Structure formats: C-alpha cells, structure tokens
C-alpha cells in the first residue's frame, strides 16, 4: 500500500513538473509570438510609410505629367502657329519673288526702250529742239523710274533677306520645338511607365499588407489559444497541487492508521502470546489427563498440534505445510484488514497473497501488508462472504 501511495505521489509530482515545463514552454512561445507581433507591427508601419511615400510620388508624378501635358499642348499650339507663320512667310516670299521678277522685266523693257530711243531717228526740221527736250524729259523720267525701281528692288531684297532670316529662325524654332516635343514625349512616357511601376508596387505593398494583417490575425488567434491553454494548464497545475496535497494528507492518514495498526498488532501479539501460553498450559494439562486415563476412553478429539518442522520435514498427522497455513485471529472491518497467526517465523513476506477458507471453500483473497515475528496483517482484496475469526488461511 505504501509503495502504491509513493508511486502515485511520484507520478503526480512528475505530472506537475511536466505541467511546469509545458507552462514554461508556452510562456516562451508567447514571448516569441509577442516579439513576432511587434516586429510585424513595425513592418506594417514601415509598409504604411512606404505606401504613403509611393502615393506621394504617384501624385507628384501625376502633377508633373499634367504640367508636361499642358506644356506639350502649349508647344503644339505654338508649333501650329509657327507653321501658319511659316506658310505666310512662304506666300509673302513667293509674292515678293514674283514682284521682283516683274520689276526686272520692267527694267529690261525700259532698257530696251532706252536703247531704241538712243538710236538716231530722223528728226523733222523745225521740231528738233522740242524733240530733244521731250527725249531728255522721257530719259529723266525713265532714270527716275529706274532709280525708284532700284530702290524698290533693294527694299524687296532686304525684305527677302529678312523673310529668309525669319524663315530660318522659324525653321530653327520649329526644330527646337520638335526636339522639345520629343523630349516631352519621352518624359511623358517615362512618367507613365513610372506611374505604372509605382501602381504595381503599391498593389504589391497592399497585398503584402493584407497578408501581414492576416498573419497578424492568425498570430493573435494562436496567442489567444496559447493563453487559454496556459490558463488550463494553470488550472490543471492547481488541481494537481490540490490532489498532491490530498494524497499527502491521505498518506499522513495512512501512516497514522499504520501506526495505529502496529499498536493494535502489538496488543494482539501480546494477547496471542498470552493465548498461546494458556493453550500450551491447557495442552500440557490435557496431555497429563490423557496419560492417566484408560486406553479405551477417547471421547475428546484435540486439534492438531502445530510444531515447527525440522530440516524441511512435515509434521506427522498434518495434511498441509504449517508455514503456509494458519488462522484468522482478528478482524478490523473499519480499516478493511485481518490479522493471521503466521509471521516471519513461518516465512511470510510482505505482499504475499493468501486465501481464506471455511469448510474447505475459498471465501476471500487477502494480501500481506505488515509482517511481525508471529503474526501478519493482511489487506482484504476480495471477499465473497464475511470473514470470521478462526477461518483457515492458506498460501497459494
């Protein structure tokens, strides 16, 4: 019984230690999860900051794109205006060129007329002075016209040169505008590509943030589960401590009862010794009376005399081994044990099983829990009938 109690106490202590180890492990796991949660929160904040930065960059890029688009529209309008001015200058140049050609034709025609006039025509007599005056007048008019035509020609040349320069400047501005338009187109395409990349990065960051939020929710759920398990383990620990305390109390009670049983056994041993002395005295008196009686008077039948066997031989007239058979001499119903008249002298050992017989019929199974010199206390394992003092005890 003490070994069973000790075994139960050891098992409970081991369970308590395992519970403490599990609680410690769960606490460490909780701390690791808490650190992971804090790290996840920091990563989430960092992702949020990066997301805000990306949104700011996207907005700035969109604003730049809008400004570039406005600038491109302005340049396109300027380009159209320059194209119209170029066409206008081209028309003016063509008009001036035609006027120049007409003036050159007039000058050539006038030159031919002057040449023809310089030839000596037949002048009628009496009108020579008037004729030459008219010729001089026509010559002066022609020279004036030539001078005017030359001035107009110079002016037209100057206009042509100015128009040419303006055309060159317009072409230069047009090429510059085209170059600037191409640069703006490249910048616009680059900004569009940058917006697409930033949008994809933003979508990716959003997905990562959602995944982190889901992971954080999972970690929170696991943390709650671990907290509940830790709480259950704490309750189990408290229950085990209570059970351990109860078992310790029961052990103390059993030790006290064992002490009481030992006291009772000592008393019974004293009583048994006294009974044995009385039995021995009665047997000696009976033997004396039997020796003085007649041989034919055999009305009293004595029980078998129990004597220690010498050198492993059985006693004559005994049908069983005296080391393995005895009697019930006391019963304690409250504590569920009996006392038999077999002890260390008969080779009885602790935890040895016995059967109790009445009229050669087994009525109970007992097990030795305490052994003394001449008696032993046995725990009642199973009883089919009520045990009585005097019932036979046999080992099996």
Image (tube, rainbow, N blue to C red):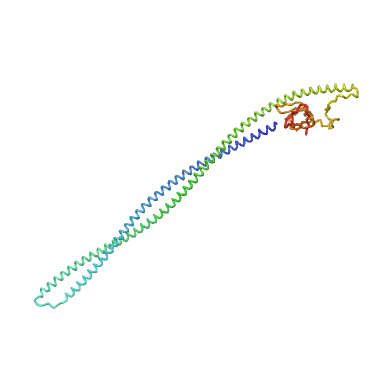
Farthest-out residue, left: 126
Q: Which residue is nearer to you in this view: 47 or 368?
A: 368
Location of residue 27 in the rendering, given as x and y in whole percent from the top left corner: 56, 38
Q: Which residue is nearer to you in this view: 264 or 155?
A: 264
Location of residue 172 in the rendering, given as x and y in whole percent from the top left corner: 32, 60
User: Looking at the image, is 281 positioned above or below residue 211?
Assistant: above
Q: Which residue is nearer to you in this view: 61 or 217?
A: 217
Q: How many marks?
A: 0
Taking the image as shown, residue 64 lies to the left or right of residue 347, namely left
User: Looking at the image, is 118 positioned above or below residue 394?
Assistant: below
Q: Quadrant of the C terminus?
A: top right
Write down the quadrant of residue 104 in the picture: bottom left
User: Looking at the image, is 134 positioned above or below residue 368?
Assistant: below
Write down the quadrant of residue 181 in the picture: bottom left
Q: Residue at x 73, y 24 (%)?
A: 264
Is residue 373 shown to the viewer in this render? Answer: no
Location of residue 157 in the rendering, given as x and y in whole percent from the top left corner: 24, 65
Q: Which residue is nearer to you in this view: 12 or 42?
A: 12
Q: Residue at x 32, y 59 (%)?
A: 80
Is residue 319 shown to the viewer in this render? Answer: yes
Q: Quadrant of the N terminus?
A: top right
Q: Residue at x 8, y 76 (%)?
A: 126
Farthest-out residue, right: 295
Write down the quadrant of residue 155 in the picture: bottom left
Location of residue 179 in the rendering, given as x and y in whole percent from the top left corner: 36, 58
């Amino acid at each position: 019984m003490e070994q069973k109690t000790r075994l139960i106490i050891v098992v409970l202590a081991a369970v308590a230690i395992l519970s403490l180890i599990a609680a410690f492990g769960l606490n460490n796991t909780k701390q690791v999860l808490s650190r992971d949660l804090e790290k996840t929160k920091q990563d989430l904040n960092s992702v949020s900051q990066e997301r805000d930065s990306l949104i700011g960059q996207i907005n700035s890029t969109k604003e730049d794109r809008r400004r570039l688009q406005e600038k491109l529209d302005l340049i396109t309008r300027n380009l159209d205006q320059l194209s119209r001015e170029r066409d206008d200058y081209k028309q003016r140049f063509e008009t001036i060129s035609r006027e120049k050609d007409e003036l050159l034709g007039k000058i050539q025609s006038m030159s031919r007329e002057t040449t023809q006039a310089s030839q000596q025509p037949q002048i009628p007599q009496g009108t020579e002075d008037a004729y030459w005056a008219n010729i001089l007048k026509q010559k002066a008019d022609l020279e004036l016209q030539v001078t005017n035509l030359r001035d107009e020609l110079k002016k037209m040349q100057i206009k042509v040169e100015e128009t040419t320069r303006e055309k060159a400047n317009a072409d230069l501005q047009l090429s510059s505008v085209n170059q600037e338009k191409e640069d703006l187109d490249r910048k616009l395409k680059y900004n569009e590509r940058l917006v697409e990349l930033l949008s994809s990065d933003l979508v990716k960051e959003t997905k990562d943030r959602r995944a982190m939020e889901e992971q954080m929710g999972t970690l929170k759920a696991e943390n709650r589960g671990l907290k509940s398990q830790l709480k259950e383990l704490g309750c189990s620990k408290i229950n085990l401590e209570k059970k351990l305390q109860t078992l310790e109390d029961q052990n103390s009670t059993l030790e006290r009862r064992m002490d009481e049983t030992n006291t009772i056994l000592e008393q019974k041993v004293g009583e048994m010794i006294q009974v044995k002395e009385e039995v021995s005295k009665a047997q000696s008196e009976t033997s004396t009376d039997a020796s003085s009686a007649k041989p034919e008077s055999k009305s009293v039948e004595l029980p078998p005399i129990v004597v220690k066997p010498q050198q492993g031989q059985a006693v004559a007239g005994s049908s069983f081994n005296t080391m393995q058979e005895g009697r019930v001499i006391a019963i304690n119903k409250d504590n569920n044990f009996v006392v038999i008249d077999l002890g260390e002298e008969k080779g009885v050992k602790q935890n040895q099983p016995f059967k109790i017989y009445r009229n050669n019929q087994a009525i109970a199974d007992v097990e030795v829990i305490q052994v003394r010199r001449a008696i032993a206390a046995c725990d009642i394992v199973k009883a089919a009938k009520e045990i009585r003092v005097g019932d036979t005890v046999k080992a099996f």
